[in-house]
Amino acid sequence: VSDRPILAVTAGDPAGVGPEIAVRALAQPDVRRALRALVIGDGAVLEAAVAGCGLPLRLHPSRGPGDLDDDPSALDVLDVGALRAPPRHGVVDAASGRAAMAAIERAVELAREGTVDALVTGPINKEAIRAAGSPHPGHTEMLAALFGVDPRRVVTMFTVGRLRIFFLTRHHPLVEAIAMLTAELVQAGIVRAHELLRELGMERPRLAVAAVNPHAGEHGLIGTEDDEIVAPAVERARAEGVEVRGPVPADSAFWQCRTGAHDAVLALYHDQGHIAAKTVDFFGTVSCTLGLPVVRTAAEHGTAFDIAGRWIANPAGQVNALLAAAELAALRSARLAASGPGRSGS
Amino acid sequence: VSDRPILAVTAGDPAGVGPEIAVRALAQPDVRRALRALVIGDGAVLEAAVAGCGLPLRLHPSRGPGDLDDDPSALDVLDVGALRAPPRHGVVDAASGRAAMAAIERAVELAREGTVDALVTGPINKEAIRAAGSPHPGHTEMLAALFGVDPRRVVTMFTVGRLRIFFLTRHHPLVEAIAMLTAELVQAGIVRAHELLRELGMERPRLAVAAVNPHAGEHGLIGTEDDEIVAPAVERARAEGVEVRGPVPADSAFWQCRTGAHDAVLALYHDQGHIAAKTVDFFGTVSCTLGLPVVRTAAEHGTAFDIAGRWIANPAGQVNALLAAAELAALRSARLAASGPGRSGS
């Protein structure tokens, strides 16, 4: 019996690089030593990717997480067989979108049954899933709907090495994102990040909030938001028992987290956290979705239609997504084991 | 005859960590192999720092850049002897401010004579130099005045590894910095960065301009500044013959520069560039001052009065400042040698 976590790995859009990076990453011995993986997708597409990349893997058709070969030379595949014909690489196609969705739906079923510890999703194409009839713009919304979770409770966290980043705001113009900030919003963001880190198994997470302005406003000399919005929010969160520091000048906060002074940083705007993570390691940045019944991770890149089927995709992002999912799942199951009755099926 | 560049290294405020990091960095063989250094400061203070740190260095009192011992066991010191009594570590003192200024003035004289290739400055204390009668808030303004250069022509560039960053705006509240942007300002910033990289010896520098908004505004869906201000500025600069790309999403631009796709990135606001550089390597980030007759570099930290005299300062920033100065000076002298009559004194 292995205690390595079992990950459901969806292959993503079959016309993109998803199947390729899934099999390339799972051909790496260090990845296999850290986790057990069940790849969910179209069997023929995954077979073609293994052959195209010349990987020393044989497919093992699996009936589910209870039926894993798990030998490093085997690729456990749950064939959702949704494709009638091989995909045309790099082409938006409703059939590919349907296949990508079928894999995600199957993965969520397994997670709901409690037979997998985390999800790692391959890249999907928004147009393809729209053509296939999905009302959702992306994974996050689709997963929230499938799990029956309020999408507002679902939160993205980036990880790259020891650096963990939460985002208070996402896809807003920079000036509007700053205008949206209120002490209530910042406080709520701090408290939610704290809750989610505790759900991940951290007893007493140490948070930092990055500042809005250079030098955290230098006592009001360089802008007022840090003194008037961020500092009061930090105070109130501390009064609620959250261990949080800030506003920390943004050019220190992320470095300090990388070097162990914080467990995570709350970024106040999209690029603040994106620049920090991706400048450190663009391909090593993993997007984690928290607030679902299981952790979901994904590489921070898309379907790369321009290079799909050329078997030259870089699996570094997928490798990091797999390792991050395994690490977070292990943290969480240690907490669950400590706190009460075990998960069913584990 | 050595062709390693000669650097004038000012010791900074004698009550801070400047003398300590100067001598610690110059005790490192890899640093000595890359450059020749003349430390300018108070001889007794430097002697105390060598002793305090227990470094295997003997002071060589030097009369100037033409009189260097340059043996790795020797520390060439130009004693400006401005202190009557040993400094009190960690205390703001006009006498320390005067000593720091005397070293900078002497270094500028040597640069004006053409006998040193670059300046590396130790950290100074703003209050101490003000108490000593300086009208300047910091090094940049002081150096501009001493060299007789319009301070508006003096530009800061950060370096950390292959990543080079120029800043269009600096110490402004974030929202105001964005409000200040115009196509003319961005265009001027691009052209000036291009000129300065050419002065450094790059034949055809490849610039990128970081975008204001997430995903560079996604064609106007996430803010208008990138389409309405940055893109036209880039077009106009290209029409002037500058090789420049942008607006590049900020979470890609700096990573691309680190990995060789650009020679430098123009950051549009303080934290955009500061987060990129300092999250990669806080202590490895070097501040370079361009637009002066010689390059000046400095570690991106202050006098650290809290640990001065305890001989525990980390010289990593100073080491990087020395190596960056040597590299930039070598680039520049290669260009000067190629383009016409040699510098006097070299």
Image (cartoon, coloured by chain):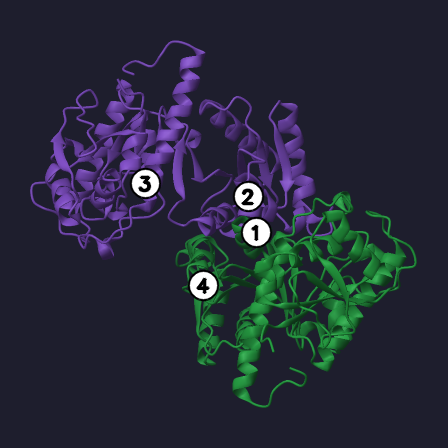
Chain colours: A green, B purple
Assess disc 4: are there few (<14), some (14-19) or many (≥20) residues with their C-alpha within 10 Å of its C-alpha.
Answer: many
| Amino acid type indicated by mark 1 | Lys
Of marks 2 and 4, the one in the foreground: 2
Of marks 4 and 1, the one in the foreground: 1
| Amino acid type indicated by mark 3 | Val
Residues under numbered marks 4 and 3 in contact, where contact means CB atoms less than 8 Å apart: no
Task: Work out whether disc 3 and disc 2 sit on a shared chain.
Answer: yes
SS for dot 1: helix
Find disc 1 in the rendering and name its residue.
Answer: A278
The location of residue B282, given as percent across then percent down, is 41, 50
SS for dot 3: helix
Find disc 2 in the rendering and name its residue.
Answer: B254
**Structural distance between the alpha carbons of marks 2 and 4:** 24 Å
Q: Write the residue at 83% across / 48% down.
A: A89
| Amino acid type indicated by mark 2 | Phe
Furthest-left residue in this view: B84
Q: Write the residue at 38% across / 9% down.
A: B341
SS for dot 4: strand
Picture mark count: 4
**Structural distance between the alpha carbons of marks 4 and 3:** 30 Å
Assess disc 1: are there few (<14), some (14-19) or many (≥20) residues with their C-alpha within 10 Å of its C-alpha.
Answer: many
